[in-house]
Image (cartoon, helix red, strand yellow):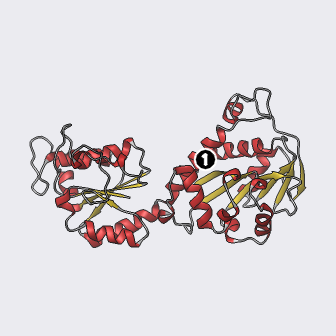
Amino acid sequence: MALVGTKADLLDLREVIKNHLTQRGYSVLAFDEADYPYEPGKDPGECTVALAPHPDVLLLILDRRYGIRLSNRLSITENEWQNARRSNVPFIVACVRRKAIEEFEQWKAVGGTWRPRYVDDVDLLRFIERVKATTFLLKFDNAEDLRVELDQKMKSLTPFILRRVADATCEKARNKRTVTVIDQTLSLGDVFDRDLYVTPPYRLVSGILPGRNLEGDAITCLQSHHNMIITGGPGTGKSTALVKSLYQRSVDMQDSPLLTPIYVDCYSLSLRDFASVEALLTKLFELALGKNIWPHFDQHDPSLQVELFFDALDEVRDGTVLLEQMVAESPVWSWCHHLLTCRWDFLSRVLGDVINI
């Protein structure tokens, strides 16, 4: 997490907030401290958030001062905010002192030559307007007030974290190449978009499903809060069917903001990644977003509707242990609903509804 704001305004806040967030498990970088990254050969004032090790959260604190302007006539703080947006920092949390918000509202109502009394520069009010257009503003009066607001805000990030993971993994799945159509240069996304996909024949080995088509039954199973295993021999289209189901759920996601279908390529996993919910999600965060954002995550959020699409479970070393854990409903498997594929000769034990292609 990168903590930015005008230095003089942070004197009564920075250490309190930094210590508070550090105790919560966050790694916090604060501007003008020894560990904050700078571009060699440039004035520290020209530093950019993009030089930091890609912070997953930018905490922007605005009070009464706009700050020192750089060559582009924008303050250091506004430059950092803009750089964070250009660098696609996943989450930007903007906190504004209530007195500044009150003057911002007056300025918007009156306009013209009105001059603020608390805020030192109308440019700060213009900055607040630009920030407000892109994100929700947290209002605070003092450090304690800000601590409470931040705790609540960080917990609320969980659905957004999962949505970013879902988007990243769905894109990865769509870009996979397929060997189940004539033109093997096509990605799965191309196959679906061009209506080249043909649902494979299958039979239901156990469980009760409508039997209309493979993808529809898979989604029905998940909607009914059950789990499913698609199994079959090599090259029978298991992965393609799984990604097709994922593709349809990603479309459903547009109308259901809390639904988060996540693709999991088991080629990238090991048995230790299934040791706990934290271990699995930490791995998924690193694969999808390039960093561990577990400290921001609330796995007990009752609003979560997570569906995991595991592709090729048999590629995980000692994967049979995972099947035994499924049957025993260990926490990592009972945390959410899932659809997975594996080869028939690997499947020694079965959980839920099994389709054999």
Quarter of the image containing the N terminus? bottom left
Position of residue 46 measured from the top left corner of the image (x, y, whole percent): 24, 45
Position of residue 84 measured from the top left corner of the image (x, y, whole percent): 36, 47
- In the image, residue 300 sits, relative to residue 5, either above or below, namely below
* 339 left or right of 281 in image: right
- Give the residue number, with chain letter if any, for mark 1: 169
Q: Dot 1, crowdedness within 10 Å: few (<14), some or many (≥20)?
A: many
Image point 89% across, 54% down: which residue? 345
Amino acid at dot 1: Thr
- In the image, residue 53 sits, relative to residue 173, either above or below, namely below
Q: Please name whichever residue, 262 or 43, is drawn nearer the observer in this view of the structure.
A: 43
**Is residue 254 visible to us here?**
no
Q: Please name whichever residue, 345 or 336, is drawn nearer the observer in this view of the structure.
A: 345
* 199 left or right of 128 in image: right
* 131 left or right of 155 in image: left
- Quarter of the figure with residue 140: bottom left
Total residue callouts = 1
Image point 37% across, 51% down: which residue? 52
Position of residue 8 measured from the top left corner of the image (x, y, whole percent): 16, 60
Image point 74% across, 46% down: which residue? 242
Q: Secondary structure at mark 1?
A: helix
**Is residue 249 visible to us here?**
yes
Position of residue 125 measured from the top left corner of the image (x, y, whole percent): 20, 48
Residue with the most extreme front position: 41
